[in-house]
Amino acid sequence: MTGNNKATASGTWVERLVRQAGRMVGAGCFALLFGCAQQPPRALPGDFALVPECAGDSAAGVGLSVTSLSIGISPELAAKGPLETRGGLARRLVVTFAPVGMRHAGSVYWSRLSLRAFGGTVEGWTRLQSEGVLIEAAAPESPPARRESRAPREHAAIDTGPGYVTVTRSAASSAALANSLSIDVLLLPGGVPIDESIMRIAALWSSDGKPLAPEEVSIRLEPVRHVPGYDAIEADVALDYVLLEGRSGTACRGSVRTHATVVDKEAVRPPLWDLGVSSLNAYRTRWLALSDPASGVLRAVFDSPAAATSFANWIRATRSAQAGPYQLGLFERSGRKPLRPLVPVDGAAPDTFRVLTPQDVEAIRTGPLGEP
């Protein structure tokens, strides 16, 4: 009897559950007891601006976050493009968005992500990925693989230019857009690259550790291209979206903006060094240069701190204002703001150049290119 009573009670509960579920299905709901599955609107205006703005709880909108991760430049681009320039960088931008309010019950079915870069140039993109789409512009060539045929969950379009990236996504089915995506971009800090010359010196010291005579020093100038600036790359990021409100099933539009550091200042600085003079624990105020009638005045640039320091030590040891065919001297920068001696710094060199004096020798200091 007890068992029959339990069965009867259980059956009654199930019957009530089924009746309630039937009423919900009749009302157009598709998730048993746990809410209605959201369906995208059957028709939307062709223009985002024609969609009505979100109001009420939906007006609280969507929160936006952007994270920048350092990645390597793909091998497929190793022989061309940004790798020809010292300072070309690759970054994976991870974008996430989510409702900011606890009562918010909508899903995004269309979005347009716009990123405007400042302090750098967008050279291109190589990969876009979300839970519903994967596009690889620089994927290695391989025979086409057989894949299971399935309808795409979302569509995406990418547009890039020197200062921007725009990603437009739209849901291809009843599933809402994934709330995260990543895009790999190639960046060139500062814009147009600058051509300079690096000093290559075969030897400065003899086998017994003595400095070579000035006329025995052989200097070769090797051209190098590097980025022109020394500031971080910042970005203004905007997300326009169309939201399907959970309760009413109507569509509304909203926008959210944020600011992000895409590349920090230390990562932007090219791996080059130069020599300058300063008092102890002070900024350098003049920079070392080479001069001869054929080449004019050229800043002394090195590809490692060891090479720069070795040449500084040779100058201290010889107290010479001559190295091979070149006269050594100092020039002042072109009067730009501190920490921002953007090239062409050498524009001031011919007018401010003066020959190195014995008083300058002990004040020579090695430092990163362009830094005081």
Image (cartoon, helix red, strand yellow):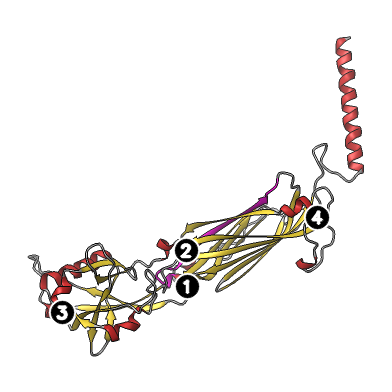
The residue at which mark 4 appears reads as 40
- Amino acid under disc 4: Pro
Mark 1 touching mark 3, by CB under 8 A?
no
- Amino acid under disc 2: Ile
Mark 3 touching mark 4, by CB under 8 A?
no
**Residue 175 visible somewhere in the drawing:** no
Q: Position of residue 206 (x, y in %)?
A: 10, 69
Precedes in sequence: disc 1 or disc 2: 2
Residue at 16%, 67% in the rendered image: 313
Magenta stretch: includes residue 90: yes
The residue at which mark 1 appears reads as 81
Mark 1 touching mark 2, by CB under 8 A?
yes
- Amino acid under disc 1: Gly
* Viewer-closest of 341 and 205: 341
The magenta segment is 83-101
The residue at which mark 2 appears reads as 73
- Callout 4: SS: loop
The residue at which mark 3 appears reads as 321
**Residue 142 visible somewhere in the drawing:** yes
Crowding at label 1, few (<14), some or many (≥20) Cα neighbours within 10 Å? few
Toward which corner of the image does residue 185 lie, by quadrant? bottom right
Q: Position of residue 35 (x, y in %)?
A: 81, 41
Distance in Å between CA atoms under marks 1 and 3: 40 Å
Magenta stretch: includes residue 199: no
Precedes in sequence: disc 4 or disc 2: 4
